Image (cartoon, rainbow, N blue to C red):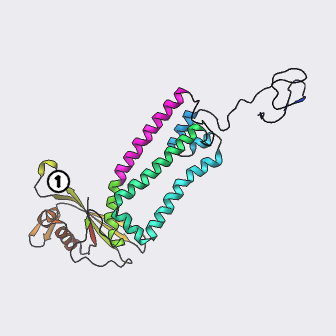
Amino acid sequence: MPNARLPWPCPRCAIQNLSSAKACRRCGSPRALPLRTRPGQVGSAGLAAVLSGLVPGLGQIYQERWIRGIIVLLIPILALVLTGAFIAIADPVTALVIRHAREATLLIVGGLFLYHLAVIVDAFAGGLRRPGALLGKRAADYAVLAVVVVAIITVYGNIYTQGTAWATLAGQIFAPVAKVVAPGAAAPQGQPVWTGRERLNVLLLGIDKRDSEDGSPENTDTLIVLSLDPVNRTASMLSIPRDTLATIPGHGQDKINAAYAYGGPDLAVQSVERVLGIRLHSYALV
């Protein structure tokens, strides 16, 4: 493709002409200008925004900015991996994240959203280094950009909502590992000391309390024992049927899901320990 800054040969008489010349100085043939007058403008700006909305960096690759597209794609992956490894290794950071699971989720999801938004705008503009890169597009491209932005706002909003619930649950489960008390979690009375080399057993209690039942005892129709083996790096889950007949300390035999209504999570933990014959290090209310 011809370059507007270099001398150009006339396609008719083959004589070289100055880069500023608009016609051949010998035969007067007009110069064939390049089809692309703006660097980085390849294809549709709206389609580039859609592609980067689906996968960050894909719009840049579509615009033949290969290196930038690959870097844009790898940056969030590497950032999440390194951040996760740092949180897992640095004990003070681990404890801080567990205590503030919701805030940590907001920070991570918010950072990813802002990064993704910047990538979409960069793909739409064909590069943000040029002045006025966002101007001069078709009205249809601006409409597509608006739809993409609304879509990712909705997606990241849902991710934050779901991520907050999972982050809170993960914080409750791994609180004994970091030796902290996470929001909504507590250790049963007489909690065994976890050395970090034996299995970590956590009781997950699914609470069922409807708005119309204020003041009535809460049921634990879901009881799951989560067991983590740090040596072999394995995990297992055991669901206990709610109608299992168990000996509830101080209340005789009854369905195991009644233990929580009788004495809260501590009594539920003691009842499950008697049924399974294991020690539970912690519990989490879901």
204 up-or-down from 107: above or below:
below
Q: Position of 226 compared to 274: left or right?
A: right
Where residue 40 appears, as percent x and y from the top left, is: 65, 38
Disc 1 element: loop
Q: Dividing the image into 4 quarters, which one contains the N terminus?
A: top right
Residue 141 in the magenta stretch? The answer is yes
What residue appears at the point 84 percent right and 34 percent down from the top-left corner?
7
217 up-or-down from 123: above or below:
below
Provide the major secondary structure of the magenta segment.
Answer: helix
- The answer to which of 40 and 256 lies nearer the viewer is 40
Instruction: Kindly identify the amino acid type of the residue bearing the numbered disc 1.
Output: Lys
Q: Position of 168 compared to 31: left or right?
A: left
Report the magenta residues as a range. Answer: 136-163
222 up-or-down from 66: above or below:
below
Where residue 142 appears, as percent x and y from the top left, is: 51, 31
Which residue is most to the left? 251
Where residue 44 appears, as percent x and y from the top left, is: 59, 32
Number of numbered markers: 1
Residue 98 in the magenta stretch? The answer is no
Which residue is tagged 1? 209
What residue appears at the point 57 percent right and 46 percent down from the top-left corner?
57
What residue appears at the point 35 percent right and 60 percent down from the top-left corner?
101
